[in-house]
Image (cartoon, rainbow, N blue to C red):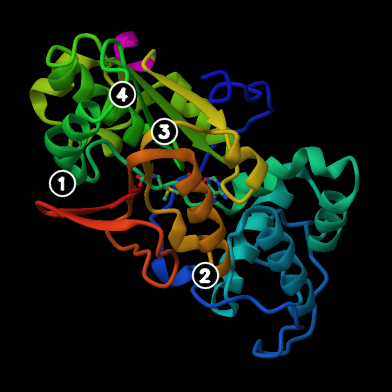
Amino acid sequence: MAQLFKFDFSKNTSSAKKEVPDKKSVGTTRPTMSATSSLPKRPTVAPTRASGSVDKIEMSNELFNEYRQYIYKSCGIYFTDAKKYLLEGRIARRLAIDKIRTFEEYLRFLQSPSGRSRMNSLFEAITINETYFFRANQQFEALENIIIPETISLKSNSFSPVYKIWVAASSTGEEAYTIAIIILERLKNRYPKVQFQILASDINNAVLEQAKKGIYKEYAIRNVPPPILKKYFRFDGANYHLVEEVKKMVKFTNINLYDSQQVRAVKGIDVIFCCNVLIYFDTASKQQVVSHLYDSLNKNGYLFIGYSESLHGISKAFHLVHLPKAMAYKKL
Ligand SMILES: C[S@@+](CC[C@H](N)C(=O)[O-])C[C@H]1O[C@@H](n2cnc3c(N)ncnc32)[C@H](O)[C@@H]1O
């Protein structure tokens, strides 16, 4: 248990951004370390900051290639050539916030010994954090009706079992809190002796800080059934505040899924939700992440990934289980 919660919560944060993910923005091909051969050549324009506009900043193809390799090595996210503009825009906003003059200056800073401690500012700039409550309803139904009953019945210590769920790319917490609500509503009474523990992690400290606050806008709660909304949220006229009873069920921490050491420290998990993050990785980084997630799971444990994601060509270790309206990967 100690391994699960030994991470450092004291990192700096800033405000998080939300954006609807564009599936085409993410790499499915393996990145090469070569120069940007397929990118159109265009001259580097020196950034003009006098107007305060980020539109005038343009990243050279060479620098774009350096950035994407740096990002890939740091967190497994791969930006294809077609998404150069996206990276450019995201980093330009970061420069404006930090009052840094050029793309090159920011990259060199990140690469310097003092810059490494500010890596999170880069992750905050480039990650896509779209999520909402009850997003993957069919998966949650399968969790409640099939997965949890089955895995609890197979637990060796059936007297007072600990049941561990890990939401491995939690963003602002909606997925993890949805699971907590389902446990409170439907499973706690059914399994009074089971201690349910939910670990939620992300690479982006800003979203983790928001998650810990448990305060949400209309967008996040739009799928919440009205009786659940009434019971577990307090509306202050503008925002929805999650009640303490739900908040205290989830432990948030920073884990970079591409950092083998960090992922290996999480052990003894019964169910992992790693949804809508693998799409941002290329094949090699998906393989690495999924193989570590496999190691984190208990025997008979399950992995859920996003509806649009698949482990085809990524891992043969899992057994694919077809559930009513959902699929899950089982560790036999
Ligand atoms: C689109 S959100 C998915 C949120 C939630 N799982 C869902 O399905 O609603 C993807 C999240 O993955 C996180 N992420 C991206 N790369 C990561 C990495 N290497 N390690 C951990 N989290 C990462 C991002 O910060 C972002 O919050």
Residue wearing tag 2 = 283
Is the residue at mark 2 in contact range of ligand 1, meaning its CB lies under 8 Å from it? no
Q: Residue at x 79, y 65 (%)?
A: 47
How far apart are the alpha carbons under marks 2 and 3?
24 Å
- Which mark is nearer the camera, 1 or 2? 2
Please report the residue visible at 54 percent of the width from the left and 79 percent of the height from the top. Answer: 82
Q: Is residue 193 above or below residue 157?
A: above
CB of mark 1 within 8 Å of CB of mark 3? no
Q: Estimate the spatial distance between the alpha carbons at disc 1 and disc 2, rounded to whole Å.
A: 26 Å
Residue position marked by numbered label 4 in the rendering:
156
Q: Which mark identifies residue 138? A: 1
- Residue 324: image location, x then y, percent: 9, 51
- Specify the quadrant of the image occupied by residue 36: bottom right
Residues packed near mark 4 inside 10 Å, few (<14), some (14 to 19) or many (20 plus)? few
- Is 309 placed left or right of 193 in the picture? right
Q: Earlier in the sequence, mark 1 or mark 3?
A: 1
Q: Residue furthest right?
A: 113
Answer above or below: position of 174 versus 54: above
Q: Which residues are magenta?
A: 243-247
Q: Tell me if residue 104 is in the magenta stretch.
A: no
Give the labeled residue for mark 3. 269
* Residue 190 seen: yes
Q: Main secondary structure of the magenta part?
A: helix
Can the viewer see residue 59? no
| Pair 1/3: label in front | 3
- Residue toward you, 92 or 300: 300
- Tell me which label, 1 or 2, sits earlier in the chain: 1
